Image (cartoon, helix red, strand yellow):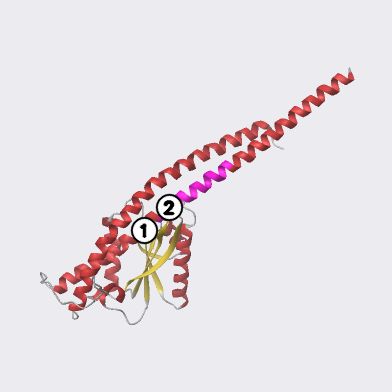
Amino acid sequence: MAVGKEILTKIRSVQNTQKITKAMQMVSTSKMRKTQERMRLARPYAEKVRLVMSHLAQTETDHGIKLLEPHREVRRAGFILVTTDKGLCGGLNANALKKFLAQVQEYKQQGIDVDVVCLGSKGAAACQSIGLNIIASVTNLGDTPKMELLLGPLTELFQRYEKHELDVIHMIYSGFVNTMRQEPRSEILLPIGQNAFAYDDANGESNYNWDYRYEPSPAKVLEYLVRRYLESVVYQALSDNMASEQAARMVAMKAATDNAGNAIKELRLVYNKSRQAAITTELSEIVAGAAAV
């Protein structure tokens, strides 16, 4: 059994750790509310872009936009892997990486090469460790998603898709369901699915009885909106991932704080037992000495 001084040292160490985890829990709680609000504010913009784009795509069938053309055969696949820059957020990154590696393995078994764009240092480190081809990476994203950091890697991906150097582009991220639940999601960014062009008005009708006059031309506006739509989808995924990160870290730090409290209780119990045993031993020695006299 450890002596009392060693046990007290352990108790103080666990108490210091508990203070840190408690502070991190409070910080994550504050940040989580801000990231959730930012995530909700980003959705109306993406929805409006999608509605205008769907209208133009239905009225302008002969647009010649390469980003809207599906490729017949998948010879090379691209991935946008969204992870966090920091750890201590439970299994958030592990679950996203597990889903990502499963899809990469499927392509490898078919003889299809993979290129990856990593958003977040955890994903970049994992891809480097297994030797995947990383064409671009963005780290130190902070707590607020910044579109200017994403434009370079996304432009590179879009250009490769237009040149038929990539035939499909997936996006892996952690979707925010609620505070206690975050799930890894996989979406096909390119080619754009037909659900992106679905339009329903307030009456549930999808036929257009109106049109606008676009300058310089409907095709040019559509090409611009397609890029803005794709960028908004990635931005939304990054916002979801950041909200998931703060929620997962808050839950993980709360669990760590509770575990530290339980450890302190157990250590105090051991300390009290050892102290009581030492007192009992001393009393026994005193009684034995008195009896000998």
Q: Which mark is residue 240?
A: 1
> Would you name the residue on which mark 2 appears?
247
Q: In this view, does 215 lie above or below 273?
A: below
Per the rendered image, the range of residues in magenta is 244-261
Residue at the extreme front of the image, as rendered? 203
User: Which residue is at the front of the view, 13 or 211?
Assistant: 211
Q: Which residue is drawn at 49% across and 50% down?
A: 252
User: Which residue is at the front of the view, 205 or 218?
Assistant: 205
Q: In the rendered view, does 204 fall on the left or right side of 244?
A: left
Q: Which quadrant of the structure image shows residue 198?
A: bottom left
| Secondary structure predominantly adopted by residues drawn in magenta | helix
Q: Where is residue 219 in the image (x, y as percent from the top left)?
A: 16, 74
Residue type marked 2: Ala
Q: Residue at x 41, y 56 (%)?
A: 244
Q: In the rendered view, does 199 fall on the left or right side of 118?
A: left
Q: If the image is split into quadrants, where does the C terminus sit?
A: top right
Q: Which residue is drawn at 31% across and 74% down?
A: 195
Q: Where is residue 85 in the image (x, y as percent from the top left)?
A: 40, 53
Q: Where is residue 37 in the image (x, y as percent from the top left)?
A: 32, 53
Residue type marked 1: Asp
Q: If the image is split into quadrants, where does the N terminus sit?
A: top right
Q: Which quadrant of the structure image shows residue 235?
A: bottom left
Q: Is residue 212 above or below residue 2?
A: below
**For the residue labelled by badge 1, is the local secondary structure a helix, a strand or a loop?**
helix
Asked whether residue 142 is in view, the answer is no
Residue at the extreme bottom of the image, as rendered? 72
Asked whether residue 278 is in view, the answer is yes
Mark closer to the chain start, 2 or 1: 1
